[in-house]
Image (spheres, rainbow, N blue to C red):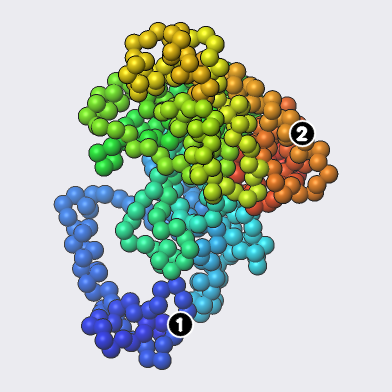
Amino acid sequence: MSILARYVPTHYSQINQHLTGVYYVASQISEVSPRYNLGNKLSRLVKAFDRAGARRTSSCIATASTTASLGIPDDSIDYVFTDPPFGENIYYADLNFLVESWHRVLTNPAPEAIVDRFKGKGLPEYQRLMQRCFEEYRRVLKPGRWITVVFHNSRNAVWTAIQEALLAAGFVVADVRTMDKQQGSYRQVTSTAVKQDLVISAYKPNDGLEERFALEKGTEEGAWDFVRTHLGQLPVFVRKGGRVEVVNERQPHLLFDRMVAFHVLRNVAVPLSIGEFLSGLAQRFPERDGMVFLPDQVAEYDGKRAAVEDVAQIEIFVVDEVSAIQWLKRHLSRRPQSFQEVHPQFLREIAGWRKHEKLPELSEMLEQNFLYYDGAGEVPSQIHGYLSTNFKELRKLPKDHPALRDKAKGRWYVPDPNKAADVEMRRARILLREFEEYRRSPQRKLKLFRLEAMRAGFFKAYQDQDYATIVSAAEKIPEAVLQEDQKLLLWYDQALTRTGAAT
């Protein structure tokens, strides 16, 4: 109903003939009356809300800035769904300027959560504004209830900023998956924005967990209490297309990351190393298809799993050391192999390796993350299971049989949880030595470095409350790398806060 509506003689209806997302006044405009434009919509709305019982419901619509206050009481909302601004996808205040100028009432752009270099808003400012919004959502949400955040942006740094803001506000992320809306938004259709939305599901920890954690903070029991509570919030069984879908958040390393973040954001030392955590996890909780469950959840999962043929494997793209280790773990768990067998397959997988990250030799990754059978003693169970299944002549042989030992010799395999702690401790020592080399390097900015060494160094410095080391080491990392790595960004932001360097 404005002069932006074009007259299109070939169209039967002249409603909504404006060009979406742009300012454009055509040479011929369509003067559409309110009755013509809204008549059918109003009749449909009346019909929708005039059904039996509809009049007994109540609703409230408010327009306010989330970075200020929603004016809603604490702990009063059952569920929050939000589709916030994502970086620099759309400049909302700027798009409103023409209409607002006509009315002489302008939006205050200062609290607008966007990335805009002309307004001095980079990713750090965007993240802080988003955190204020999420903190307001957390304030009004009831304990133990959920928030859903829809995300669509092609930049990894924006994705990291959203997750970091969500965690810093006190939420715990429980699930991330894609949602195909079939009909894309204007930006998704016309720009480089991702074509599918990512949906983040997170919850506000209930008062019971927070109260217990206040008493148990810094102890192993406090860490395991969080893990038990978190596992209780996660979906038990997800089926898609006749196959079991892996719930990422139930994977051991992601559980460790959530536990660490929960402690760091509450300024509490993490009581368990990754090795101790993986070993304790295997002792306390059952595992199925690479996922960890509470004891009372296993019966439900096993019952539903029996009716499904297989598990949909997560596709792994090797772009850094973490994904390379994941690929090797999956590959060697299926088929323990020698270095000579693994090497050519591994070389095919690393074509997309990130240019800033140092590529460790395959031999280094095997030595630091896996175990090697040299032919002495009994054949490890994983190798024995593979050989006895795939070689008829080796079936039913004892683990110390010479033929079996000879066939197993020289193979790398995935350590069982009881030995994982020793492997991780050995790897941590190597990574920390490498971190010290980077920290003492005279280079102002590191062009090539091992990201896992940086993560290990940041984690150790946080445990030692050596925040200055985190800040100084972060200055040597390219800004884009720091902003895209959620772990480094988490420790860096906390170090800035504790040293008083945050603005």
Residue 447, relative to residue 48: is it above or below?
Answer: above
Q: Amino acid at mark 1?
A: Tyr
488 lies left or right of 41: right
Image quarter in which the N terminus is found: bottom left
Question: Can you give x and y, in whole percent of width and height, for residue 110 in the image?
Answer: 62, 61
Task: State the residue lying farthest toward the left.
Answer: 52
Horizontal and vertical percent position of residue 355 = 63, 50
Residues packed near mark 2 inside 10 Å, few (<14), some (14 to 19) or many (20 plus): some
Closer to the camera: disc 1 or disc 2?
2
- Towards the viewer: 77 or 98: 98
Tell whether 132 sits left or right of 78.
right
Query: Does the residue at mark 1 contact the one at mark 2 (Cβ under 8 Å)?
Result: no
Q: Residue 236 appears in which quarter of the rendering? A: top left
* Residue occupying the point 49% across, 51% down: 70
Whole-angstrom CA distance, mark 1 to mark 2, is 58 Å
Q: Residue at point 52% right, 9% down?
A: 377
Instruction: Give the residue pinned by disc 2.
Output: 436
Of the pair 58 and 340, the residue shown nearer to us? 340
Residue beneath the point at 43% across and 8% down: 401
Q: Position of residue 112 (x, y in %)?
A: 56, 60
Q: Secondary structure at mark 2?
A: helix
User: Would residue 318 be seen by someone viewing this image from the given angle?
Assistant: no
Residue 408's label in the rendered image is none
Q: Which residue is mark 1?
A: 24
Say how many tags the image has: 2
The foreground one among 78 and 399 is: 399
Query: Is label 1 in a helix, a strand or a loop?
Result: loop
Name the residue: 29% across, 23% down.
302
> Who comes first in sequence, dot 1 or dot 2?
1
Which amino acid, by three-letter code, is at mark 2? Glu
Q: Where is residue 314, by image quadrant? A: top left
